[in-house]
Amino acid sequence: MDATRPFSRYFVQADTDITPYGSCDGSHPPCRFRLCAKARGHRTNGPSPCLSDCFRIAVCPRGVFGALALVHDTYVRRGLMRPNRWRMRVTAYHGLPTSEILVAIRGGELISTLTIVQDSHRGLPMESVFTGEVQRQRKASAALAEVSCLASRPGTSDASPAAMFRLMSLTAQVAVFRGIDQLLIAVHPKHVGFYVRFLGFQEIGRESSYDAVRGNPAVPLVLDFTDLAERCPKAYRRLFSQPFPRWALEQQRPSRRVLSALRLLAWMDNHLGTPRKAAAETDQASAFEDMRPALMVA
């Protein structure tokens, strides 16, 4: 029996199966979604505790911008960044075609997200602090990627750890499907034990101050897929025992208009964040607000 068959019916079948509630004029929250009919009809059946959830790669504008808005609000609440006018956490890596935003949706609401950044000419986000560690892994591995911009809606991660494990499972399976050998991540020291014990990550460096999160401490970790099954079989089963269908792992990219908007937002965040340039920031943010309705139907 195909191992993916019992689970495939709980995932949307195409981009059009996740549709935003209401209009695209901003009058409704950007991260409300409708599950496909099959998912709505089978929420309580089956062995998995998170069959009512939907896990996928975000492609539509509302999914992409809703995920980045969730990251912004989470990071601001935890003191990892200052708020900006457009209320989205966008980095220069989000505008690259090699980056993918993964989301978890429950009951029509986006509850968790993270971004996979594949190694490229721009390098990896954590390389700005852990340069030596990343270079060592790059020499030892054929292909690297980094998990970045993790965020969860308040109260959801503690209430349903199974959903978080399932999102990490999608992350691992997408990475392997892309041919990634090692997955890097920089986490707060208090979370190191969770990633090492339950997900099979390994420490590759010492704690350091991370400027990208306002100087908060971070520890570099790596998840090596080449020996995970032998080294940490429990973590391997958590990540790969329930495979996602092939179509859910295939690369999907936002439209050119969405990628252009992400590049614009990243540029504004890097160049217009000082009080001296507040007027220019206001003009640029207003320009983005003017673009938003068109982006929502891109």
Image (spheres, rainbow, N blue to C red):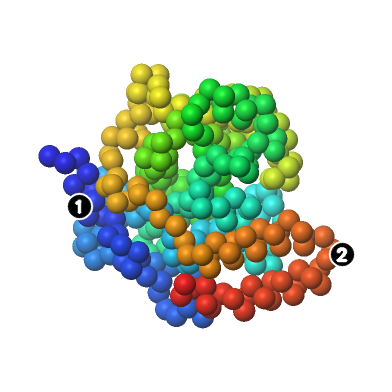
List the residue tagged with mark 1: 45
Dot 2 or dot 1: first in sequence order is: 1
Q: Is residue 134 above or below residue 54?
A: above
Amino acid type of the residue that numbered disc 2 sits on in the rendered structure: Arg
Alpha-carbon neighbours of circle 1 within 10 Å: few (<14), some, or many (≥20)? Answer: few
Front-lying residue, 141 or 193: 141
Determine contact: label 2, label 1, CB under 8 Å. no
Front-lying residue, 162 or 8: 8
Amino acid type of the residue that numbered disc 1 sits on in the rendered structure: Asn
Is 90 placed left or right of 140 in the picture? right
Viewer can see residue 294:
yes
Residue 141, x across and y down, in percent: 50, 26
Residue 89, x across and y down, in percent: 62, 56
**Which quadrant: the N terminus?**
top left
Report, in whole angstroms, how far the alpha carbon at label 2 lies from the one at label 1: 57 Å
Badge 1 marks a residue whose secondary structure is loop
List the residue tagged with mark 2: 276
